[in-house]
Amino acid sequence: MLERLGGAAGGGDDLYMSPVVFYESWRGLAYRDAGRQLEDLEAFTRTLRWVDYERAMWLDAARLLADRRREGRPHDDADLLIAAFARRLRATLVTNNSSDFADLGVEVIDWMVE
């Protein structure tokens, strides 16, 4: 996975981290009092482009939630916000939980799979 990340960064791709993913990562490390890993996360995120959520992303996530609930396929709010973030940026979503995003209209890749 790190090789692929390096290749994407070296290949000129814009790399983002959804603020929701940053929050989820930060809270988990903070809870475990993982000081060195928090420093590594901070250093890593400084190498990425930062984009905060805008109104259109929130509305897209809300529409996704409503549509999926009507279809009987509810999703976690965090996943909907991550998908809306990727959709708005027309970005490929890198995750090892591909099935969580399969029906959310976003291109997904799992770098853990060869």
Image (cartoon, rainbow, N blue to C red):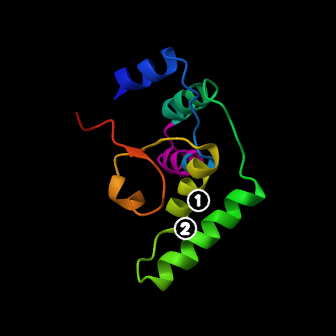
Q: Amino acid at mark 1?
A: Leu
Q: Which residue is mark 1?
A: 81
**Which quadrant of the figure has residue 55?**
bottom right
Q: How many marks?
A: 2
- The residue positioned 55% from the left and 73% from the top of the image is 65
- The residue positioned 59% from the left and 56% from the top of the image is 84
Chief secondary structure of the magenta span?
A: helix
Q: Amino acid at mark 2?
A: Asp
- The residue positioned 51% from the left and 46% from the top of the image is 25
User: Is residue 40 or residue 22 the one in the foreground?
Assistant: 22
x%, y% of residue 62? 63, 71
Q: Within the magenta stretch, is there residue 27?
A: yes
x%, y% of residue 31? 51, 51
Q: Name the image quarter holding the N terminus.
A: top left
Q: Name the image quarter holding the C terminus.
A: top left
Q: Which residue is mark 2?
A: 77
Above or below 100: residue 5: above
Mark 1, Cα crowd under 10 Å, few <14 / some 14-19 / many 20+, is many
- Asked if one can make out residue 90 in the rendered structure from this viewpoint, the answer is yes
Pointer 2 with pointer 1, Cβ within 8 A: yes
Mark 2, Cα crowd under 10 Å, few <14 / some 14-19 / many 20+, is some
In the rendered structure, the answer to whether residue 41 lies left or right of residue 75 reads: right
x%, y% of residue 7? 42, 18
Q: Within the magenta stretch, is there residue 56?
A: no
Magenta stretch: give its range. 22-34
Above or below 46: residue 68: below
Q: CA distance from mark 2 to mark 1?
A: 6 Å
- The residue positioned 56% from the left and 48% from the top of the image is 86
x%, y% of residue 40? 53, 27
